[in-house]
Image (tube, rainbow, N blue to C red):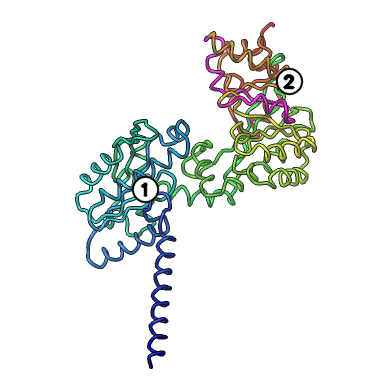
């Protein structure tokens, strides 16, 4: 009996040990390793539990979503380790300042959240701002972080966890757009914006298969002769009720929803079908299309584009694919593969928005990029601001010395056009020559004039 009792005791001890290990593993799986707060997964399940409890008891739940202001600049100046120290210290202070029953979480990066049953939302938000605004000493330097807070309340604002988080995020965005270091509660204006967004999302999903997203065209003009030598393809949404919508009204949403690739493909195929006869008839030489950075991050992008181009009558040598400078910085190796693959098939690659960021001349030296497009922000002041004019002239000279063709975007005034031509810019586009237009208007302009009737017909 003694041996049996001893054996049972050992088994009980082992069971207790295993249970402790299980609880520890579970706790670690639910804990953010940097701050010791609960992580996003535990936060999500905790929020659902709190809502169930409040629903049964007829209570309320306030969700406070927190984001640090200018955290990236601190990270860049002091280093990632210092940034981690700040996050850990802030997590500790948020935990220390928590009201009884509150759940404090780190959602990732510099984003935190607090789930509370408080009925005084304003006082709690102000207290959070005070906690966020406290100074920290890191590597002997005094750092004041500061942050913004977005608030949404159940059941007043939302009836489920998904909408509550979404509405709190919208309120946070409003707080940050107001300059930061403030809080904002979800309100009727944000609700109206949310409902409008949902409607627009549903309409956009319907618009793509309905063929409402269509290509428009803006001419690219030879700087010396003022003849139209090409067109840039621009997407427009012909909305049944709202009329014609520019890309800014729907492209950001399409990127968020993962619809941008479908839109790009539909516009590309329609544009190729439209412009192939223009090229065949000698009306233009170049058809320039923009590519979403999300598309470019697909390793198979260039192969897929070449495959789609092969199904059209547009020659590869007439196509220019515009990529942004920022994509080169995101993944230079992938950019190189895409550019080299396209160039090998005769497709021209242009570096778009040149001059807005890093103006990567090194990329022009080592990648088969044939064209750069000077961004419109540079063109605004050429010809009237001496410093800007000298900068643009230097950029033009550098690009020409590398054998790269230059296209200036956003030319709106004769003085800009004259300066750019005198500085050696080869091609231009902008409202001074023509606004974007639908295919039938573009073809009519090409066939009727193609140059002589356009502005800039002035002596050199």
Q: Quadrant of residue 349?
A: top right
SS class, disc 2: loop
Q: Which residue sits at x=37%, y=56%?
A: 38
Q: Is residue 194 above or below residue 235?
A: below
- Give residue 331's position: percent from left, percent from top: 63, 39
Magenta includes 320?
no
- Give residue 260's position: percent from left, percent from top: 58, 45
Magenta span: 357-385
* Horizontal side of residue 122 vs 263, given as left or right: left
Q: Which residue sits at x=77%, y=46%?
A: 311
Residue closest to the eye, 451 or 86: 86
Q: How far apart, in angstroms, are the residues tagged by discs 2 and 1?
A: 49 Å
Residue closest to the eye, 223 or 170: 170
- Give residue 118's position: percent from left, percent from top: 22, 53
Residue 97 appears anywhere in the view? yes
| Label 2 CA crowd tier, 10 Å (few <14, some 14–19, many 20+) | few
Q: Which residue sits at x=51%, y=38%?
A: 245
Q: Is residue 155 above or below residue 176?
A: below
Q: Which residue sits at x=68%, y=45%?
A: 301
Task: Choose mark 2 or mark 1, whichever is in front.
Answer: 1
Residue 186 appears anywhere in the view? no
Image disc number at residue 402: 2
The residue pinned by badge 1 equals 112
């Amino acid at each position: 009996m003694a041996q049996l009792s001893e054996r049972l005791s050992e088994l009980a001890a082992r069971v207790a040990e295993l249970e402790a290990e299980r609880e520890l593993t579970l706790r670690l799986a639910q804990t953010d390793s940097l701050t010791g707060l609960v992580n996003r997964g535990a936060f999500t399940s905790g929020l659902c539990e709190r809502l169930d409890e409040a629903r049964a008891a007829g209570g309320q739940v306030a969700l406070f979503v927190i984001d640090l202001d200018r955290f990236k600049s601190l990270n860049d100046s002091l280093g990632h380790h210092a940034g981690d120290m700040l996050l850990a210290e802030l997590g500790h202070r948020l935990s220390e300042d928590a009201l009884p029953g509150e759940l404090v979480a780190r959602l990732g990066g510099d984003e935190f959240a607090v789930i509370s049953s408080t009925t005084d939302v304003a006082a709690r938000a102000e207290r959070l701002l005070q906690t966020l605004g406290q100074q920290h000493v890191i590597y002997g330097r005094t750092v004041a972080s500061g942050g913004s807070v977005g608030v949404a309340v159940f059941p007043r604002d939302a009836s489920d966890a998904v909408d509550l988080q979404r509405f709190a995020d919208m309120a946070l965005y409003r707080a940050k757009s107001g300059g930061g270091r403030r809080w904002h509660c979800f309100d009727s204006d944000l609700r109206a914006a949310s409902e409008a967004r949902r409607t627009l999302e549903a309409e956009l999903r319907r618009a793509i298969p309905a063929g409402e997203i269509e290509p428009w065209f803006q001419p690219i003009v030879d700087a010396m002769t003022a003849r139209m030598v090409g067109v840039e393809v621009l997407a427009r949404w012909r909305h049944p009720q709202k009329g014609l919508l520019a890309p800014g009204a729907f492209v950001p949403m399409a990127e968020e929803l993962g619809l941008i690739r479908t839109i790009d493909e539909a516009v590309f195929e329609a544009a190729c079908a439209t412009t192939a006869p223009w090229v065949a008839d000698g009306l233009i030489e170049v058809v320039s299309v923009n590519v979403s950075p999300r598309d470019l991050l697909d390793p198979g992008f260039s192969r897929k584009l070449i495959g789609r181009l092969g199904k059209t009558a547009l020659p590869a040598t007439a196509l220019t694919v515009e990529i942004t400078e920022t994509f080169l910085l995101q993944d230079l190796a992938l950019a190189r593969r895409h550019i080299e693959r396209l160039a090998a098939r005769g497709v021209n690659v242009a570096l778009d928005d040149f001059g807005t960021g890093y103006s990567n001349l090194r990329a022009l030296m080592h990648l088969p990029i044939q064209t750069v497009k000077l961004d419109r922000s540079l063109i605004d002041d050429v010809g009237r601001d001496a410093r800007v004019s000298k900068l643009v002239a230097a950029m033009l000279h550098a690009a020409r010395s590398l054998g790269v063709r230059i296209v200036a975007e956003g030319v709106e005034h004769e003085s800009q056009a004259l300066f750019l031509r005198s500085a050696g810019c080869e091609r231009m586009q902008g409202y001074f020559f023509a606004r974007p237009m639908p295919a039938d208007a573009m073809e009519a302009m090409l066939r009727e004039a193609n140059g002589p009737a356009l502005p800039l017909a002035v002596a050199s």
